[in-house]
Amino acid sequence: MDVSESPIFEFCFQALAADQLFEAATNAICDLIHETQEIDDNMAVIERIVPKVIALKAALATAKDDPERMRGYARIFSEAGETYRFLILQHTETFFPIVEAIGQCSAYEDLDIVPITFPFWMRLAQSIGKRASIPPLLHDAYKSLVTVMIEHLHFPSDSATLTGREMDDFRSFRHVMGDTLKDCCYVLGTEQCLLETLQLVQAALAKGPDTPWQNIEAPLFAMRSMGAEVNPKDEHAVPIIMQLIPTLPTHTRIRYAALLIISRYTEWISCHPDYISPSLQYISAGFEDTDQDVIGAAGQSLKYLCQDCKQVCVSACMSPVISNYVSEASGTLHLGVAYLYCQHWDEASARGQGGCLRSYRLCYLGNANGTSGTVSQDVRDYHTCRCVC
């Protein structure tokens, strides 16, 4: 018997109104939608299901204070979106209310519910990527999703209210949201996503020193997440970001986030060697910070800078900036930078540049032997390259 032709079909949707039956009705509707994934074979049933699902969108406004109902609606809409994603692409205007409803669920304040929607955004992005053009409505949906994800990335204004486990869970969830931001890059293009995110940082900075640090750190984290999608040849978004980093406030969490942006963008820096020296200056300032997370982030940035830029780093060592680091190598900052350059001595020798780095190595060793244990510990901190995300 065809369930869609039986009274059970209507009853499943009617049962959503009863609290006692809500979860069971949600399960039944999700199963029903899932069973229609063979679109061509089930079009008649789909034509009955979709209007019922779209009609549920109005219930989101009244359910916003009821997390369990929001969870159920998020499951139904997301199941419909995933199952009918090809129909969404073919008949965008007809099916777009489902996408809008999923967007509302993604924007919901309860971060236990938000991830229910992520598989939909990922699979739809994969389907869009196979098409020559993107329907404007879906383009706008992903553009809005970028803003929603960055809003969710904000640390609580009072982190002291979270337990250690809750903070760890939130940090882990930020990386999951970072994957959804990559889906947005896949649809919109990384450059556009970065420029949209950059505008959020600039708007926060424009408000002056009283702006909450979270309003700067969250989009910086987003930029870091998008780093894997950055084109090393980009000439529009990334240069603005790299020029912005040295001007950022020195708040610990902001500096930590900015250092990790550098560590993620080192392939781009390798193609734009003029940014090596400014990056080194910012990394060096990180080594002077008292926060261990920042020092670890500086170590990680330095590691990847030398790893990805080693073909140009040896030449860069001739710059006045690095020369100053070595000639004034009396503190942790200069010794750390000089030491890392010394690690490329053998490779540099093969290119006839060993003399330069040999003098740096001798300078480093001479200073290290004449300094206290503090420097040795900081060098070990660099080796550890600790980075607590």
Image (tube, grey):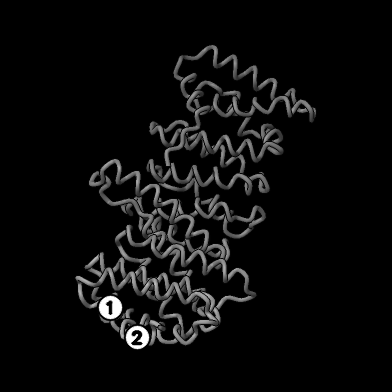
Whole-number angstrom distance, CA of label 2 to CA of label 1: 25 Å
- Farthest front residue in view: 1
Q: Residue extending furthest top?
A: 370
Image mark for residue 59: 1
Mark whose residue sits in front, 2 or 1 = 2
From the viewer's side, name the closer residue of 34 and 318.
34
> Where residue 169 sits: x, y (%)?
35, 47
Residue 209 shows up from this direction: no
The amino acid marked with disc number 2 is Ser
Quarter of the image for residue 107 reads bottom left
Image quadrant in which the N terminus is located? bottom left
Q: Is tag 2's residue or tag 1's residue first in the polypeptide sequence? A: 2
Q: Residue at x 39, y 44 (%)?
A: 253
Instruction: Specify the quadrant of the image occupied by residue 307.
Output: top right
What residue does disc 2 label?
6
Residue 247, given in percent of the width and then of the height, sits at 47, 48
Q: Residue at x 31, y 71 (%)?
A: 26
Mark 2 is surrounded, within 10 Å at the Cα level, by few (under 14), some (14 to 19) or many (20 or more) other residues, namely few
* Label 2 residue SS: loop
Relative placement, left or right, of 135 versus 389 is: right
**Horizontal and vertical percent position of residue 288:** 45, 31
- Image quarter of the C terminus: top left
> Are dots 2 and 1 in contact, CB under 8 Å?
no
